[in-house]
Image (cartoon, helix red, strand yellow):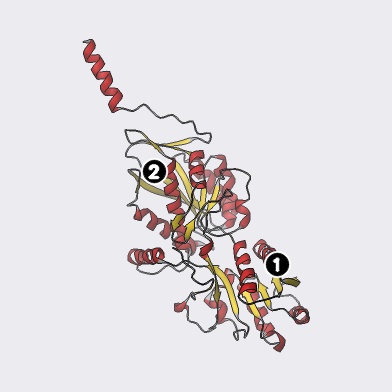
Amino acid sequence: MRRFLILCLLALSTCAAPEMSCTDPLGCVFVRANQPLLLGALLDVSGPAAALSNEVAQGMTLALAQRDNRLLEHPLRVQLFDARCERAAGEAAAREIARTEQIVAVLGTVCGESASGALLPLAEAGMLLLSPANSAPQLTNTAVFPPPYFRAIPHSLRQAELMARFATEMLQAETAVIFYNETPYSEGLRQTFASTFTQLGGSVPFQTRFSPGSSLDVMLQVVILNEPDVIYLPLYEIEATTLINTALSLPRLQEIAFLGTDSLLLPSFTAGLGAAPEGGLYVSGYAVSGQGYSQFLAAWQQAYATAPETPYAAFAYDATDLLLNAIAAAAQRDSSGTLLIGRAALRQALAETRDWPGLSGSLTCAPSGECASGSALAVFRLTDIDQPASAWPPLPYWPQGVDGG
């Protein structure tokens, strides 16, 4: 009888691993055998970013499909929440997510406003937020490591740095004038371009805030007196169209190069111009290319019978892939197939990402949570103001050899 009991105990110790215990300071998610591994998708499915959110969701879906919708022998499931591109709605949705304890991590948002509302409730719940689309630089201003927030897209200030380099290295510009508006987006770009341009040896003798009601004629006379090589416009479409069309009516400004940001990388912007500036019209923006991206486009075409309209689809794919890779690295698994995923361990695994081969380039996560590739930005030359929307966007102009890997 005693020998029988010993054999039974030995069999139990071999066939049933002891229950894993959570020692993670931010808590853990247990995913039992055969249960789905649950992710949250906090997108702005209603409001001004609805169309872009739909494309981001499609990019996430392709990334999951690439892994057959499974990870660590568990099915993957995504629960969608709407942040409506509003701070208050982002906060409310995040609190709902935080009450769903089985959600391992959250992908989103598209709008920076909703992300700013969602960050604190998610961080208090120990959850991380990984965005494929937020470009507001302040979102990664944190003293916490590993951070609760990551992103797979370059923040907007990197566009200003790139354009300052382009102006000095490619256009050989020595002086620049800047028109900006009252938004944090424009103000941040203005400051970064001016700082980078002067560090590279240039000067910025005149900067002025502009809106459609401004005394533009007076401002442009000041511009003429300063004789700039380039005019930098971190503005939105209506403002930039008004300014450029007015400037080109003055002969002494017709040969100056005009520089803009991704807010002007639109077919409607060039269509609204009366003529193309003789000195050139250049805008910075997101650019993805390379063999991996070509394969992604083929998969997208097969899945959706169309092409993605923006590079955000690729950033969404990369963000999802980064998160799944980090989950696989952080998870513990017992012999029954149960997973234990520590929330702090997951943040740490994502923060340790190095040289991950994404569609948008090689991705490495900085301590701040910035994971984007520098090769995902480019300068575009807008030479044909009558270019049809079907031919949009134009090919990257600089740097040469922009490649998404």
Say which residue label 2 marks. 37
Q: Position of residue 393 (x, y in %)?
A: 49, 74
Residue at image coords 60%, 81%? 280
In the displayed structure, 43 sits above or below 229; it is: above
CA gap, disc 1 and disc 2: 47 Å
Say which residue label 1 marks. 194
Q: How many marks?
A: 2
Toward the viewer: 75 or 381? 381
Of badges 1 and 2, nearer the viewer stands 1
In the displayed structure, 169 sits above or below 327; it is: below
Report which quarter residue 32 is drawn in. top left
Residue at image coords 43%, 44%? 327
Q: Amino acid at mark 1?
A: Ala
Q: Amino acid at mark 2?
A: Leu
Whichever of callouts 1 and 2 sits on the residue coming sooner in the sequence is 2
Toward the viewer: 339 or 402? 402
Circle 1 crowding by C-alpha within 10 Å: few under 14, some 14–19, many from 20? many
